[in-house]
Image: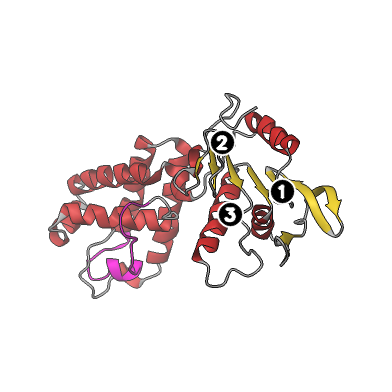
Amino acid sequence: MTASSALTPGPLLSTSPLPDWPGVEEATLTALPCAGALLLPHDGLPVADVQGQPARWAALNLVSSALRRGVPVLGWGSGAALLGRVLGAAVTAGQPDWAAAPRGAQVHGWSGLVPRHWTLGRAVAWADPEVPPQVRADFLAALPGWTARSPASPLEEVGGETAVRAVVAEFYARAQADPLLGPVFTAHIQDWPAHLNRVTAFWVTVLGGAEGTGPPWRGNLNAAHAGLGVRGEHLARWLALWAATAHDLLPTPAAGLLAARAQTMGARLGTRPGLRGTSGRPPP
């Protein structure tokens, strides 16, 4: 069985080139959602001490994101140590560095004090620098049963930035025509494209931000709504209209998540007496 086998549910990603694994692609964060698995080959680099090694930190972040999503991971040699470190295992410097078995892992073989082969859920580790053909074959054979994925962030759960941008655009189209909210926006917003981009960035940021294509939103929610003459009835109408728009455009779970986040923010805003302030910044 090769890495390009038809049984593989998606492309195999690797942190290092693997000429003997046909069809393997470079591992990146953006490629993870469609990945069949993540491979962590031995590269001989340290794992126990990664200070001053940004590439190592990036690899740790990649592995962590893969595990959160439910992407199967196979690591060997230093790759096994990376996998163990992300799963909370102690790492010992050596030739190569090696990781203790993470809590809850099943150890299938030892080499002295080193757990040579262990598994934990969809994580498979082989401590030696070369992965045996049977371990490789068993991992590939398991992939068709490991196709389910978990969203890596609330942003991904609602459908990514594209879904958020669509809800924001439709919400403000409705808000401008709303007899209660319309006058507030008319009085304070002159550049609508810039405002829609700013609000989209706000939602992308509060929902996780990993997929945002623009700069993250930076600001203070209370300050952004201060000085607008906004009262409790405006907030209640904003929340109702936002929830209705989300439910009209998105699946129920995604819409519910957006509505719940808005309710949480609305509760914080509602603690300001009269919802009044001094800033002239437009509201989200």
Report crowding for label 3: few under 14, some 14 to 19, many 20 or more residues within 10 A (C-alpha): some
Report crowding for label 2: few under 14, some 14 to 19, many 20 or more residues within 10 A (C-alpha): many
Q: Mark 3 points at which residue?
A: 64
Circle on res. 125: 1
Q: Give the range drawn in magenta.
A: 212-233
Does residue 227 show up magenta in the picture? yes
The residue lying toward the viewer, choosing from 45 and 205, is 45
Quadrant of the rendering where the C terminus is positioned: bottom left
Residue that appears at 52% across and 48% down: 152
Residue that appears at 26% across and 42% down: 170
Helix, strand or loop under label 2: loop
Helix, strand or loop under label 3: helix
For this orientation, the residue located farthest to the top is 6
Residue that appears at 42% across and 48% down: 259
User: Within the image, what quadrant is residue 46 found in?
Assistant: bottom right
User: Within the image, what quadrant is residue 86 found in?
Assistant: bottom right
For this orientation, the residue located farthest to the bottom is 278
Q: In this view, does 172 lie above or below 234?
A: above
Q: How many marks?
A: 3
How far apart are the two marked residues, 2 and 1, measured between alpha carbons? 17 Å
Expressed as whole percent of the image width and height from the top left, the position of residue 141 reads 68, 30
Does residue 217 show up magenta in the picture? yes
**Amino acid marked by disc 3:** Ser
Expressed as whole percent of the image width and height from the top left, the position of residue 138 reads 72, 34
Q: Mark 2 points at which residue?
A: 36
Q: Is residue 93 left or right of residue 199?
A: right
**Amino acid marked by disc 1:** Ala
Helix, strand or loop under label 1: strand
